[in-house]
Amino acid sequence: MAFLKRDGGLIHYEAQGKGEPLVMLRGLGRSSRYWLGFEKRLSKFFKVIQIDLRGLGRTQLPMKWTDSIDDLADDCAAILDHLKIKRCHFFGLSLGGMVVLRVASRHPDRCRSLVVANSSSADYPGFRIHPSAIKDIVWGKMRGRLSEAVLAHTIPPSVVKARGLEILKDWSKIEQDEPMPKEIILKQLLAAARFTIRGKLQGEKPPILFVYGSMDGLVPTYNTKRLHRLVKGSELKIIKGASHEIQVGHEAQMVQAIREFCLSD
């Protein structure tokens, strides 16, 4: 395990593989362990750098109520400084996508390319989380079946049928090892609610690919489409049959999409 000292605590990160560096960032309430091995697939083609955001996983830097997506982006830039990496590729899922977009706006010289999956912003009206998902997840929490409710809205039904019990077991093990305070979810939601990108990516931008799963049951797909329209010159790709955890059940397709986009030069 590797850590970077920041004001107030330590940021956990891990690096593996060879090739051009690629930073991977997870979404709401999820540490890097929730990639469930997807990072190993990408490490065959990139030097993969996983980062646990503030308040999550093995990071020992609490997230404050006043922390923003900007602060999380600056943490990523600090880790690149620490590793002496001038520029790299970024892959962000959901809230992680907001962070990599903010890295691109605050530290554009550090970005070679961005892949943003199933993300959103506050730049336009509309639901950023499916109301039905909120209802089912709250009801699942009350019934002691939170993970099952999250599974149903983030993993495709065919994958749930084939691998649902295995995924729940993996999640349970992570939750036992990495207990997460409930307030971290609220703090991340607050930071996400304030996140905007309109007008932030000015001048020369890195190549940006927005990706969404056609069966995303957590974040309505129009969010990614609107982000694509907001960022001039960006590209858009759909992974048919994928859900919010866009890589689960579509690992090969996502590896191919990231490789083709980031290594196209």
Image: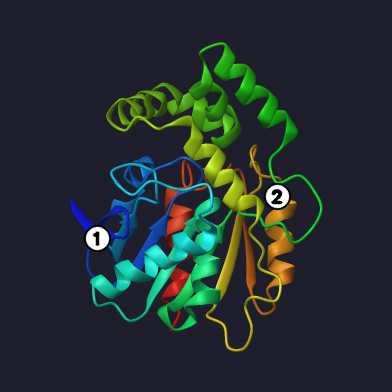
Percent across and percent down for residue 165 are 41, 21
Q: Is residue 19 visible?
A: no
In the image, taking residue 175 as reference, residue 198 lies left or right, namely right
Q: Is residue 118 above or below residue 202?
A: above
Q: Is residue 235 visible?
A: yes
Q: Which quarter of the figure is the C terminus placed in?
A: bottom left
What amino acid type should be assigned to the residue bearing mark 2? Answer: Thr
Tell me the number on the disc at residue 221. Answer: 2
Q: Label 1's element?
A: strand
Tell me the number on the disc at residue 45. Answer: none
- Crowd tier of the residue under label 2, counting other residues whose Cα lies within 10 Å: few below 14, some 14–19, many 20 or above: many
Q: Is residue 245 above or below residue 160?
A: below
Answer yes or no: do the residues labelled 1 and 2 have beta carbons within 8 Å? no
Q: Is residue 249 above or below residue 1?
A: above
Q: Residue furthest top?
A: 143
Mark 1 to mark 2 CA distance (whole Å) = 35 Å
Q: Residue furthest right?
A: 125
**192 vs 241, nearest the viewer:** 192
Query: Which of the marked residues, 1 or 2, is nearer the chain's N terminus?
Result: 1
> Pointer 1: what residue?
4
What amino acid type should be assigned to the residue bearing mark 1? Answer: Leu
